[in-house]
Amino acid sequence: MIRIFLFLIIFLIQCLEANGQYNDKWISYYSKINMNLVDSFIILPNQLDTLIIPTPITKNQPYSFNPIEKDITGKLEIERINYTDIKYSLSINHIKESGIATLNPSFQLGTESNSFENDEYWLYEYYVTENKDNCAIKFGIMTESLTGKKIKPVIIVIVNNSCSEISDELVFR
């Protein structure tokens, strides 16, 4: 009986600590497969291993980016609000939208890489989960090359076909 009581107390503490630190779908996804989220770590109890949740940008620090393509006017503003979510505001030509994008929960299965400035960079994918409009589909954040070279964040925005007046991939720096 004492063990059950202790288990419930530990479970409640973990739930309270997780509140707001991760996207709700992340909590559901990892609890179903018996993994625990603790700060920027995913604890795999059965395998005695730990994964680090990538945090390519600082939490609660607003970032502002401009498109690198000369014929596109606009701005992208992002801010990491917890370990898994970024808040964004996107303005491209006459299109304006804002919302939340969430880090792909299966990022540990294989991070994408992308070619930029004659090097390959890790690309952390954030999928749009909440927005007012439907132009942006996902964001890729690059801050480090495969060889370890650090750069200021570069953002790749993949846009929906309905935004046909702009290309399907925009790069912001």
Image: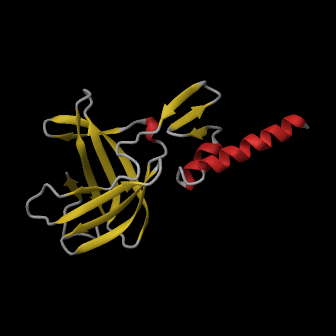
Q: Colour scheme in the image?
A: secondary structure
> Where is residue 39 drawn, in percent x and y?
53, 40
Q: Is residue 52 above or below residue 18?
A: above
Image check: 124 left or right of 32?
A: left
Q: Please, which residue is most extreme toward the bottom here?
A: 94
At horizontal 85% and vertical 39% (from top left) the residue drawn is 4
**Compared to 156, does 52 lie above or below?**
above
Image position of 89 with respect to 54: above or below: below
Most extreme residue toward the top is 48
Residue 42 figure quarter: top right
Q: Residue at left 31%, top 47%?
A: 141
Q: Residue furthest right?
A: 1
Residue at horizontal 40%, vertical 73%?
A: 132
Q: How many discs appear?
A: 0
- Residue 17 location in percent, x, y? 62, 47
The residue lying toward the viewer, choosing from 162 and 56, is 56
Residue situated furthest left in the rendering: 70
Residue 54 at x, y percent in the picture:
41, 39
For the point 31% across and 49% down, the residue is 140
Quadrant where the N terminus sits is top right
> Is 130 situated left or right of 79 in this image?
right
Give 129 or 99, whichever is nearer the viewer: 99
Q: Does residue 159 sit above or below 105 in this rendering?
A: below
Residue 13 or residue 70, whichever sits in front: 13
